[in-house]
Amino acid sequence: MEIKDIYINKKPYTLHIAYQDDEAKRKAFHAMTYDFWEFTFESYYQSGYWDEHCILFSLFEGEVIVAHTTLSLFATHTPTATLQLGQLGTVMTAATHSRQGLSRFLMNYIFDRYRNQLEGYFLFANDTVLDFYPKFGFVQAREFQATKVFQKQPSSYTVQSVDLTHPVDLQLFQHYLKTGKTACRFDTSNYGLTHFYCYANPDFGFAESIYLLPELETLVIAQQEETDLLILQAYYLGQNQLDQAFNAVAATNTTRLVLGYTPAEDDYDFHPYKEEDLTLFITPSLLPYFEEQHTMIPLLSHT
């Protein structure tokens, strides 16, 4: 945790960094997050998997939080390089302090702090603020989602539901996250955020969507959505047998596989993808990964 006294436009503020262990400040952050987005990160904190890759940057005026930005760090694996990237999220400014340069200060502070450590940034902007981020050099990028026409075949492979409330299952899940391969062309290696979506938030996450196929040494996070099987991510320890794993997990009425990440395989169709009221912005250094090939930010990496 860091605390810095600063002035913005001659007004005093206190910048708190990575302060989630301070209960009072954390509760203030959660209250602001709930006002803006109608959820909090408290369950994530209580889960114990909020790690050093998720960093809070908040401006306080006295004991009142007035502006915030979260920085999430990713070691992102591509076919040609491993990129150290940052995602900016939960960008908020209190209505009483809008248009006072507070968000601008936080973004510039983060850029200066990580100038020699990160090779690029991305973020998802609400469609009401699309003119804000280009001021910092961000450009809009199109995402593409991979899909494949599917017809289920008979399968004899065992499919076991994984219950992360059981210590043995949780340990197994973590083993796959740490040591498994993903066959993902833009792999953000999001250990902490995967716990956020699959463990810390059972009410709106994917806690009931985790499956182990022991004979294939494969773990799949997937949801059946009518005739689509949405595969959020898959991990395998040995040989890549994802086709067999997806076939085993799919319901009998499945007619299409839909991926929540960019596959390394080239036997998928790609379609433009955009979440409602959200637009992906990236720094120019990442343009080749989105303009020269079809790419999407893994769904389990969104903040």
Image (cartoon, rainbow, N blue to C red):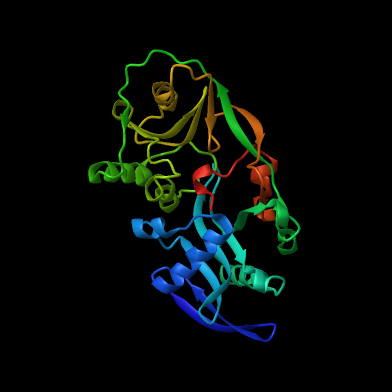
Q: Is residue 77 above or below residue 64?
A: above
Expressed as whole percent of the image width and height from the top left, the position of residue 42 reads 41, 59
Residue furthest to the left in view is 168
Q: Which residue is more in the foreground, 4 or 74?
A: 4
Quadrant of residue 170 within the rendered picture:
top left
Seen at 76% across and 58% down, the residue is: 131
Seen at 40% across and 56% down, the residue is: 44
The N terminus: image quadrant: bottom left
Residue furthest to the top in view is 154
Q: Does residue 267 show up?
A: no
Seen at 65% across and 43% down, the residue is: 276
Q: Is residue 156 above or below residue 260?
A: above
Expressed as whole percent of the image width and height from the top left, the position of residue 292 reads 69, 40
**Side of 280 where 30 appears, left or right:** left
Q: Which residue is more in the foreground, 295 or 8?
A: 8
Q: Does residue 290 show up?
A: yes
